[in-house]
Amino acid sequence: MSLALNYLDTGGEGVPLVVIHGLFGSADNWRSHVKAWQEMRRVIAVDLRNHGRSPHAEGMGYDAMAGDVIRLLDRLRVPRAHLLGHSMGGKVVISLARLAPERAASLIIGDIAPVAYGHDHDTVFAGLRRLEEGQPANRREADELLGEHVKERAVRLFLATNLERAEAGGLRLRLGLDAIQSDYETVMAPPAGEGAFSGPTLVLRGANSPYVTDSMLPALKAVLPEAEVVTLEAGHWLHAEQPEAFRDAVEAFLARHPD
């Protein structure tokens, strides 16, 4: 059953840009980009299930997550949208475009390919479980707990965006961590649906990221035959590492494909 997702909607006319975050992210991570893009178009930033302020539920299948987004578009009376997704969010928008191509005006994919990936979040899950167990009183304590497993400070800062103030005091995770971890194999799997999406597509990849290598391009083109592939001097979080270049590429693409 589809869920009623939390979202941020700037309002405005025309075909909107729907922004979908990656694993352990949220719409909040995209606020600076939304602020810039809203000067030109309506932007809708989404919290996927088990993320941000959206409901928690079992099942992280891409058909289910795409169904959640379609339900939101129906609720907002949006017949078609430009769909931007980073990482896991990229697989969500590919799934949506395959399952309901009439709803996708175009796709913008941030550093992900429509392939299965291996396990590389073990330390992140361990750090987040340590946060749950440790019940930090403040963000300094939270960073120390995360640091027992996650050594990269940038990753710890990103994960800490999932903390919120608990009613009883201290900080707690707002992630549906049990549901995410129990269905992690599905998150790492290819997108849902079959066949190719033949609409306008932009794929932005990081030059220093292993997520969209040259060897993956044939598989990517088989699913997204019209894809323009642009490489930015960044890692996997290219929208955070190269925000202006990322926005410029998105804006130039949308200017060529306004409808």
Image: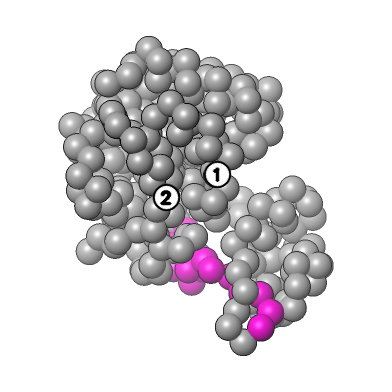
| x, y percent for residue 207 | 65, 24
Residue type pointed to by label 1: Arg
Horizontal side, residue 55 vs residue 33: left or right: left
Q: Quadrant of residue 212?
A: top right
Judged from this view, the residue extending furthest toward the bottom is: 168
| x, y percent for residue 231 | 59, 19
Q: Give the range drawn in magenta.
A: 169-184
| x, y percent for residue 176 | 48, 68
Crowd class of label 2 (few under 14; some 14 to 19; many from 20; radius 10 Å): some
Image marks 1 and 2: residues in contact by CB distance under 8 Å: yes
Q: What is the number of the mark on residue 8?
A: 2
Q: Is residue 22 magenta?
A: no
**Residue for badge 1:** 31
Residue type pointed to by label 2: Leu
| x, y percent for residue 56 | 40, 69
Q: Is mark 1 on a helix, strand or loop?
A: helix
Query: Which is nearer the eye, 72 or 219?
Result: 72
Q: Is mark 2 on a helix, strand or loop?
A: strand
Residue visible at 66% across and 83% down? 169
